[in-house]
Amino acid sequence: MEYIKNFNVRNERNLTMLVDFYELTMGNGYFANNLEDKIAYFDMFFRQVPDEGGYCIMAGIQQLIEYLTNLSFTEDDIKYLEEKNIFSKEFLDYLKNFKFTCDVWAIPEGNPVFPNEPLVTVRGPIIQAQFLETMILLSINHQTLIATKANRICRAADGRPVMEFGSRRAQGYDGAIYGARAAIIGGCNSTACTIAEQMFGVPSAGTMAHSWVQLFSTEYEAFKSWAEVYPDNCVLLIDTYNVLKSGLPNAIKVFDEVLKPKGYRPKGIRIDSGDITYLSKKCREMLDEAGYSDVKIIVSNSLDEYIIRSVLRQGAPIDGFGVGERLITARSEPVFGGVYKLVAVEGNDEIIPKIKISENEEKITNPGFKKIYRIFDKETDNAIADLITLDGEKIDVTKPLVLFDPVFTWKKKKIRKYYIKDLMVKIFDKGKLVYECPEVCEINKLAEKETSRLWHEVLRFENPHNYYVDLSSKLWSLKQNLINKYSNIYNDN
Amino acid sequence: MEYIKNFNVRNERNLTMLVDFYELTMGNGYFANNLEDKIAYFDMFFRQVPDEGGYCIMAGIQQLIEYLTNLSFTEDDIKYLEEKNIFSKEFLDYLKNFKFTCDVWAIPEGNPVFPNEPLVTVRGPIIQAQFLETMILLSINHQTLIATKANRICRAADGRPVMEFGSRRAQGYDGAIYGARAAIIGGCNSTACTIAEQMFGVPSAGTMAHSWVQLFSTEYEAFKSWAEVYPDNCVLLIDTYNVLKSGLPNAIKVFDEVLKPKGYRPKGIRIDSGDITYLSKKCREMLDEAGYSDVKIIVSNSLDEYIIRSVLRQGAPIDGFGVGERLITARSEPVFGGVYKLVAVEGNDEIIPKIKISENEEKITNPGFKKIYRIFDKETDNAIADLITLDGEKIDVTKPLVLFDPVFTWKKKKIRKYYIKDLMVKIFDKGKLVYECPEVCEINKLAEKETSRLWHEVLRFENPHNYYVDLSSKLWSLKQNLINKYSNIYNDN
């Protein structure tokens, strides 16, 4: 679809200046200290799965790529920075001639991801690698948050289609657009956000609002007019006045009088308020009695995974869900706390690992330039654990693999029949894009497949099993040594 | 600042297709029923103040204006819609030649606003007025949410500056950019979001990250290098290793050894983790002892209005706050539930009011084309109440004004010394922009001024007084008549 690509170009923005101001003051500082070309490694990772869940769904790489591809400072940007009167001429000249030269690795979108493993790693001159912090975090935090929430909601819907309906309550235009994209990645089957179909080729859908019904003198007339325009795809919104006394009876009348004579089957009814469990049961009975057992019941109105699970457990005969504000804002936990930390620098032809110490053990970073391997069970193809190693470490898959808990190291697990997958792929090589993003609908399928390879204990909503994210012995020892070194220097004086 | 205006143009987007798909199916439906030119009135309003607060701060009008000004369908849009195979040629031709001709009224940004009063009213051909729903809601919902949250946080900070630090955790790029704008409207004094300064002329600010400190072999060396680059604006981040044993002693050493000899005073220190109450008290003592009683203590780390109030009550000597994720996502209540409802249509030279009935009394809409007057006390200049009237009603300010509760109508209040202000201004006249948006910093001042005119009982966080939003007798009677009419038709069959 060529026009979709054109469309993207039309809306392409240069977001170079969407950056925390301190990245600029630091950039200027590197220059002043002749450190701008120092090669540094940064990891983007998160510490906690939202909603106390067992895993997240990776998303946001395509937008990160678009940002990195467009990275350049305009004359206006330079002029604006000059007027701040704090940046050196050398630094501003560097920005003027900015050329992106970093290596970037990332876990592809749609994969389940877990706390404390790098989702994105950047290697390059520190002035560049540092500068990317805001946009890497913003891109991945937002879409991973929404994809993860959508995945929870779709799991609760248990195979029934979930439509993303939240544009009007999103946090800003991109919240709606990229939120719709992430919702599809997480498992939604369509979105009400029209522009998202144009931009990403994801299916958009929608029927009528209450205002359509209000516009006509009677509800019957409103339904009749609608059925005449859309006889082959007729879904009626039946809660403008009274679902059981007016909405559904009028809908059935229109099905009988307008669609039946023309040989059309109605598609569905939608309920957007009230007690949806009670109403859907009553509507199902009335529809069946009237000979419309194939007509679907769609519900919407402040739904999330908990309400969907609850109404289904109560036996509500609902065929599809429209989910709005609680999905598009991840209302129950609207912050995805990804961070971006310096993990190493290069010097004297070696990689010097760096660590951020904290009194809170969870907040201590994993130092060094690393790789992540996902370990799969050879018999079930299920994911057993992720293993983080230093770059260059080899895993001999012909031998048993011993995993150990990074805190309680006596907790060990020996794995025999397994295979491994290198999780991260290279996205940019010395600044050149070397990765092609799959279509969003492909990512949706990947997410479904890879999620199905997790143990049920990791998938469940309540008290999920903590999926193992372990460190190789070598990485574990390196980390301990650095912790000891820094706590000696900084805590014992 | 000419370059700011250019910058806006560079990043201008056509968001015409950011629309719920059902607006398009309805648009096509109006055409099929020859209703496209029917003149309709829609109100945008909300039903509840987030966080159980007493008022909201209006925001988002400027972006709404940009959207309406750019409203047009490209050839790609038309081609995309054609391929859906459900839209008539007449409808697509209409879109191709689309010309915006609506009247739009709105309450200007920065004003305190209350539940159930129209924030935006649109009058025009229903096919157009309906089409605007998604973007009106999205623009106003998002920015009003963040401006309101920022206002709460700034009130808790009680005059101390609050810096917006949340870009990396925002829900999408616009969440960061327009969120920063709304944060300034709500009361923040600066933002870390650089592009927001370029676009809106709001002050941006920022110093260093932990990575700066990690990059150097020692913390002292890192601070020293920083102080040498920024001697006249030196703020050091002191929690990379250990605030009291390492961070602050190193900072003081650098103040003494680098800044003092050159005659510079340091500006501040920042603490981004740990027990900020305890640490700020200890740091204050140590700074004072070292002769730096003028050096400010800035804190950040998952702050919101509740934590800020708590640490200040405990006597934490904090001079400024950096607030991130909990502000930029309005984490405690991340959804602003604005709605957009049909309230009237024109026919036979009269305005025919429309109502949306609900079993939930709060969800019944106020019908008709309306005006809002804010009633001020002549002696104190405080806002007493908002009165919603039908268009054309006159208030004789020389006579006492009787307000009554719209539910418990026996609750009456007679007001004698008052003056009134027509709250809504006309933004578009038959599609032509007739309003000039103030600068964001001006809106910030307006918000501060207008908020100070609310009673303390409305301002407080806990159990605020419900500000009166009353209906004129004429509007109240009209509403009752419509409720009775529809409940007779739809509930009693």
Image (cartoon, coloured by chain):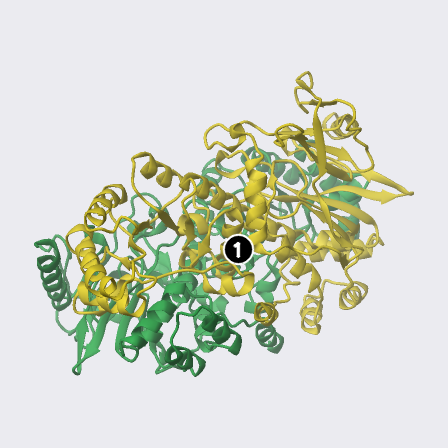
Chain colours: A yellow, B green
Residue A336 location, x and y as percent?
Answer: 54, 44
- A33 or A4, nearer to the observer: A4
Q: In the displayed structure, does residue A453 sit left or right of residue B452? A: right
Say which of A26 and A477 sits in front: A477
Check the picture and name the quadrant holding the C terminus of chain A.
top right
Q: Quadrant of residue A128?
A: bottom right
Q: Residue B320: image x %, image y %? A: 55, 48
Q: Residue A219's x, y, as percent?
A: 19, 63
Q: Is residue B461 visible?
A: yes
| Relative to A287, residue B436 above or below | below
Q: Quadrant of the N terminus of chain A?
A: bottom right
Q: Is residue A124 left or right of residue A260?
A: right
Q: Residues within 10 Å of mark 1 (few under 14, many from 20)?
A: many
Instruction: Please indicate whether residue B214 sits to the left or right of residue A159 in the image.
Output: right
Q: What element does badge 1 sit on? A: helix
Q: Is residue B172 above or below residue B78?
A: above
Q: Which residue is mark 1?
A: A181
* Residue B256 visible in the picture: no
Name which residue lies at 68% across and 25% down: A406
Amino acid bearing label 1 = Arg
* B11 on left or right of A101: left
Instruction: Say if B365 sits above or below B294 in the image.
Output: below
Instruction: State whether residue B75 is above or below residue B306.
Output: below
Where's residue B326, x and y in %? 49, 46
Image point 60% across, 34% down: which residue? Answer: B282
